[in-house]
Amino acid sequence: MSSRIAEIRVPPQCREMIRAGALVAVNHSGGKDSQSMTILLSRIVPRAQLVAVHAPPRGVGWEGAGPHAAAPLIMAPVSSGKTLLDRVEERGMWPSSQARWCTSDFKRTPIERELRRYLNLNPRFGNRLVNCLGIRRDESAARAKRVAWRRNQRLSVAGREAFDWLPIFDLSTEDVFLVIRAAGQTPHWAYAAGMSRLSCSFCIMASRADLRRAAELHPKLYRQYVEIERRIGHTLSPSGVSLPELTGISPSGSGDGADAMDLGRLRSRPAAARRPLARRNDLKSPCPESGAAQGSG
Ligand code: SF4
């Protein structure tokens, strides 16, 4: 493996914080980016300072997705006990890139709650936190503009000093798989099955190809999503196009999208939010695969 990949660039202030005993938390979705980030961090962070924190996407995730054993694990469930689909039905609409409450309610809030609790329970970290996210510049133009090290203002209160760090910011997708293979690990099975990302099985911003493959791999969950689209009259996709139309897969399994939505019954997204289908493959999930999407997009 090239030294560029094997050695992640550590900002001087980050190095200082690690040396001073800060808690280093990996926001972990169970996806490839989280996995490679954990492998690389476990080489430079003392084990007693490294944890993985995981917000399980209850009912909408992938079987077998979860952090690997390279670091102790903190689970961060949603305190209400509700699932994403429960909230969609309550609200009568799906989240969108403008109203991304799925990320904040189901990932960021529970993860930050658990990190605050863990720091309070473990004074040895001196209320210092390095919050690691698996965002990579290659993922999208918006992500390429992110800063790899910056103060987390939301968490830097009540005597806490918290920074967000993007340790694998410069790695390509190929690099990420290389790190995993070189460590003797395997990525989640869904990649080999054709998924390009591993977050919610059906993400509001997923590409058409990923939605289609997820529908094939998760037919029962797909049916549930299609039924909810119908019940609430609102599409998962910001394009305003129903899932059966997008994927070409009928929820009853005919595979031809023949019973695609009666679009007349759907409440369309606002015109400004509708996107031409041809652009959908350019879209990226606002959640990094590292799991929490803290303030990210
Ligand atoms: S993966 Fe997509 S649908 Fe799931 S929480 Fe993130 S943005 Fe929302």
Image: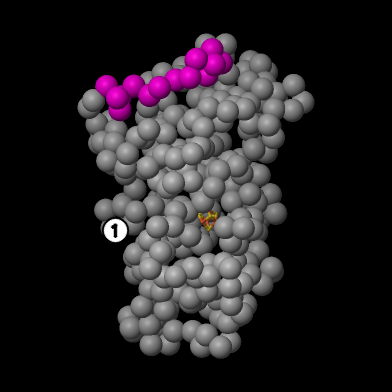
Tell whether 107 sits left or right of 282.
right
Quarter occupied by residue 96: bottom right
Tell whether 64 sits left or right of 73.
left
Residue drawn at (66%, 44%), measured in percent from left and top?
109
- Dot 1: what SS? loop
Q: Main secondary structure of the magenta part?
A: helix
Quarter occupied by residue 128: top right
Please name whichever residue, 172 or 221, is drawn nearer the observer in this view of the structure.
172
Quarter occupied by residue 43: top left
Residue drawn at (56%, 88%), measured in percent from left and top?
264
Q: Is residue 222 above or below residue 291?
A: below
Q: Is residue 102 above or below residue 259?
A: above
Report whether residue 264 is seen.
Answer: yes
Q: Position of residue 58 (x, y in %)?
A: 54, 56
Tell me: is circle 1 under 8 Å from ligand 1: no
Residue drawn at (41%, 39%), measured in percent from left and top?
137
Tell whether 154 sits left or right of 163.
right
Residue drawn at (57%, 22%), measured in percent from left and top?
23
The amino acid sitting under disc 1 is: Gly
Q: Which region is colored magenta? A: 3-18
- Mark 1, residue position: 194
Q: Is residue 232 above or below residue 155?
A: below
